[in-house]
Amino acid sequence: MMMSRLKEVTRPHHEAVEETLGRFKLTSSLDGYRRVLRRFHAVHLTAESAFQRLDGWDAIGIDPAERRKLPLLEADLRALGDDEAVAAPSAEAPLPPLTDLPRALGAMYVLEGSTLGGRYITKSVGASLGLTPGRGCSYFASYGDRVGPMWRSFGAAVDAFATTEEVRGAIADSADATFRAIDAWFSRDEPGPR
Ligand code: HEM
């Protein structure tokens, strides 16, 4: 199955990105948390505009509009007093080319998967920084109690779509490249491009 293959091939990248994010001390420092949000904002600016440009979502049973995270990121940044990051984002994060559905699905796997870890971050920053899904932590809370169902419906659509080895390879390569790009983007030294 495609989804278990993706989990397998990207496991080392997940560990790397978890460690990279940890350096921001996002669960114990409001400043670090805000810097992480700004970087995710740049990632989603790039990814969501690429998803929007593609046709064919209906046929595979995924609605990228329903999975948008930009409004959540922008609400959180505003709630934390960072209106400037929303009004004048200084960069879009460099991601691999997301110019067809297999490549888009590889990137979407990485971003949708991050909602799973988001549940733990939500709990943690609620306890340490006092942020809630209604104030400052709507991005990590994402779909709330629908995280599980949204992840399973995404997985079912990917598994149904990935019927050839050519498509499976393209999705896996894109997930791999997206994880690498996100890790590199978060690893850029501060002060950097946001
Ligand atoms: C401190 C940061 C993070 C923590 C603590 C974390 C934690 C987790 C945990 C516990 C899971 C498994 C959840 C479950 O099976 O119920 C998970 C899954 C996942 N996370 Fe993260 N995560 C973090 C950051 C990220 C980031 C930044 C990304 C990508 C941008 C990411 C992508 C994924 C993906 C794709 C999965 C799904 C793996 C699969 O089952 O196929 N995570 N994460």
Image (spheres, rainbow, N blue to C red):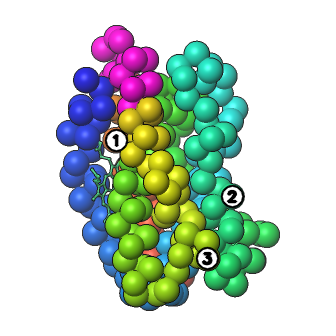
SS under mark 2: helix
Q: Are marks 1 and 3 in contact (CB under 8 Å)?
A: no
156 falls in the magenta region: yes
Residue lying at 58% horizontally and 16% vertically, measured from the top left: 59
The type of residue carrying mark 2 is Pro
Residue 89 image point, x, y percent: 71, 66
Mark 1 and mark 3 lie on one chain; the one further toward the N terminus is: 3
Q: Which residues are magenta?
A: 155-169
Q: CA distance from mark 1 to mark 3?
A: 33 Å
Q: Residues within 10 Å of mark 1 (few under 14, many from 20)?
A: many
Q: Which residue is mark 1?
A: 176
For residue 109, say whether it is visible: no
Q: Which residue is mark 3?
A: 135
Residue lying at 65% horizontally and 27% vertically, measured from the top left: 54
- Which SS does the magenta portion mostly show? helix
Residue 24 image point, x, y percent: 40, 79
Q: Nearer the viewer, residue 98 or 121?
A: 121
Q: Residues within 10 Å of mark 2 (few under 14, many from 20)?
A: some
The reply, left or right, for residue 120 in relation to residue 67 is left
164 falls in the magenta region: yes
Q: Nearer the viewer, mark 1 or mark 3?
A: 3
Residue 137 image point, x, y percent: 54, 71
| Quadrant in which residue 20 is drawn | bottom left
The type of residue carrying mark 1 is Asp
